[in-house]
Image (tube, rainbow, N blue to C red):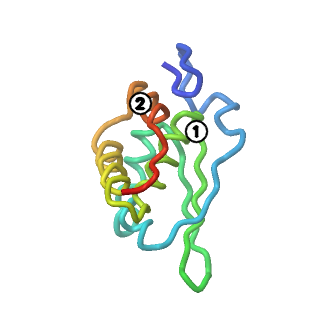
Amino acid sequence: MDMGTGAVSKEPWWTLPENFHAPMVFHMEEDQEELIFGLGDTYLRCIELHSDTLIQLESCFTATGQTRVTVVGPPMAKQWLLLMFHCVGSHYSKCHAQGLKMLERVRSQPLTNDDLVASISLPPYTGD
């Protein structure tokens, strides 16, 4: 199943040019990077493999020590990761807990089409 379109695809995701259009680019604090990717980015490769994405991390020389994150891959996988990153960084306990569950999921096993569809159908979180 192609996670970007829902269509059956025999080609690996990285061979489809459309998965490299519109990379997702944002900044995160260094402590959040360490929480998500581990010390020395220990979990980076397994998160990439389990989400069918490529993730580039670049340290920025700012006062707060931010990291520039660039993600390419199927659109639904990028959306799932964005939601996970947002929730992990949330100050709302329920949202943060959901983000940690998502993080554990993507670290431990490949995301399924059901995972991707379920995350898109979640209502926006409005607070505790």
Q: Nearer the viewer, residue 109 or 27?
A: 27
Q: Position of residue 53 (x, y in %)?
A: 52, 41
| Quadrant of the image containing the C terminus | bottom left
Q: Position of residue 122 (x, y in %)?
A: 44, 36
Mark nearer the N terminus (1 vs 2): 1
- Left-right relation of 122 to 10: left
Q: How many marks?
A: 2
- Left-right relation of 1 to 17: left
User: Label 2: few (<14), some or many (≥20) within 10 Å?
Assistant: few
Q: Residue at x 59, y 65 (%)?
A: 27
Residue on which disc 2 sits? 118
Residue on which disc 1 sits? 73
Q: Is residue 73 above or below residue 125?
A: above
Dot 1 falls on a residue whose secondary structure is: loop
Dot 2 falls on a residue whose secondary structure is: helix
Q: Position of residue 116 (x, y in %)?
A: 45, 32
Q: Position of residue 41 (x, y in %)?
A: 40, 63
Q: Nearer the viewer, residue 8 or 96?
A: 96
User: Label 1: few (<14), some or many (≥20) within 10 Å?
Assistant: many
- Residue type highlighted by circle 1: Gly
Q: Residue at x 50, y 71 (%)?
A: 29
Can you name the residue that lies furthest to the bottom here? 63
- Residue type highlighted by circle 2: Ala
Q: Quadrant of residue 108?
A: top left
